[in-house]
Amino acid sequence: MAKEKPHLNLVFIGHVDHGKSTTVGRLMFDSGNIPEQAMRKLKEKAQELGKAGFEFAFDMDGLKEEQERGVTIDLAHKKFDTDKYSFTIIDAPGHRDFVKNMITGASQADAAVLSVAANDGVNAQTKEHVFLARTLGVEQLIVSVNKMDISGVDYKEERFNKVKEEVTNLIKGVGYKSDDVQFLAVAALKGDNIVNKSENMDWYKGPTLLEAIDNLKEPELPTDLPLRMPIQDVYNITGIGVVPVGKIETGIMKIGQKVIAMPGREGKGVNGEVKTIEMHHEQHQQAKPGDNVGVSIRGFGKKDVARGDVVGPADNPPSVVEEFTAQLVVLNHPSVITVGYTPVFHVHTDQVACQVIKIDKKLNPKTGEVMEENPDFIKNGDAAIVTLKPVQPMVIEKQKEFPHMSRFAIRDSGSTVAAGMCIDVKKKA
């Protein structure tokens, strides 16, 4: 059997209308991952709806119906193969879905492609997406300066350099090393530098998008850590039974393994044994980090487990916390955050309200140094160490032990107010 290619989760982020979906559609089509016939249908559909030119975006957006019907195990994922890697591409459509996708973990992306329109440059959402990508542990970044074909930009090198400078300042500010970031000059709608080299920018010597994603480094899989699989959905399939679906974050899951889902309906955990593991509609003997799987587990009843529960080994259960200490950064709060504030935390696939019971320290957001002990409040732009108490049972792990299970975002009335990671836990007795 041919050796499987390494797998990477790749998320496309950036401001709304900066061409994320079109970039993905063009990448899939020009590399032969969308048949000509299917593209023709999308083109006709786009014209019928008076949206000529949106056919590439429609390829990714057709997914939304599939997601809402919840029929396949692949959720919001598109498979895409290059010579070197097997990618799962996540197009993060618009701001609200981006947060849901990125945080509640349709993926813990290994790498991100940030789309920045050449005519617009950096704006508020670009900043927020970059910050979130960084806080949520996306280590590798590609910056795609898109719409180089647009009137006023006209494929000019000066404009590309100007946007590159703006983005470089932004990503340095959140801790990316700009030398490690690939900057591309592209026009997704026309196909310049997506798969094929552009004839309109002879000054550009960098890679195409296809080459850039193949230049990404293969992430190290945390196979040596204990198993953790946050449940994304639970299906009840006739003849098979209860099938939790999710992405293996750490460890290895094997058939016959004794597992426990925490917290489970009663908050005490639910014990079971792995019966079958399915991935992309094929049965497997085991699954490793990064794999999106559907698992049938003997002992799990329909009402025992739900989205947000985490499956782990029976002898090393996921941590259900009484309280936890976190390091966070306030992004976008309308006033100030004080003790007693109880917003919703998005952690892996779970959403739980957590109360601020103590603001321990205010930090310098760029260096992490302590600026003030026990401040009365924190506001936009502040970084802090905070003690939190979930209002119902919730699994979160320490960053040192399980970095993949420690990150969260805080949402309030439809926007992301803060993001961070758990640094210590007080487990529930």
Image (cartoon, rainbow, N blue to C red):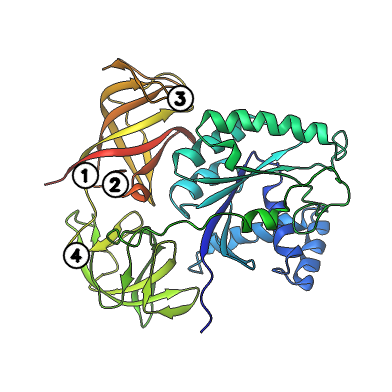
Which residue in the structure is indicated by mark 1?
Answer: 321
Residue 408 or residue 113, whichever sits in front: 113
Mark closest to the chain's N terminus, 3 or 2: 3
| Snapshot quadrant of residue 283 | bottom left
Q: Which residue is mark 3?
A: 366
**Whole-percent x and y of residue 128?**
55, 34
Disc assigned to residue 90 = none
Mark in front: 1 vs 4: 4
Task: Name the residue rendered at 37%, 19% in the picture.
Answer: 378
Q: In the rendered view, tell whether residue 348 sits above or below residue 277.
A: above
The residues tagged by marks 2 and 4 sit, at their Cα atoms, a distance apart of 17 Å
Spatial CA distance of label 1 from label 4 is 17 Å
Image position, residue 348 (x, y; %): 38, 50
Q: Earlier in the sequence, mark 1 or mark 4?
A: 4
Q: Kindly identify the residue that appears in the image at 40 percent across and 70 percent down.
A: 294
Q: Which residue is mark 4?
A: 314
Q: Are marks 3 and 4 in contact (CB under 8 Å)?
A: no
Label 4 crowd bin: few (<14), some (14–19), many (20+), radius 10 Å: some
- Do tag 2 and tag 1 residues touch (Cβ < 8 Å)? yes
Is 200 rendered above or below residue 156? below
Q: At 36% across and 79% down in the image, what residue appears? A: 285
* Residue 141, position as x, y percentages in the image: 58, 45
Tag 3–tag 1 contact (CB < 8 Å): no
Q: Residues within 10 Å of mark 1 (few under 14, many from 20)?
A: many
Looking at the rendered structure, the kind of residue marked 1 is: Val
Q: Quadrant of residue 210?
A: bottom right
Q: Amino acid at mark 3?
A: Lys
Whether 388 is drawn above or below 7: the answer is: above
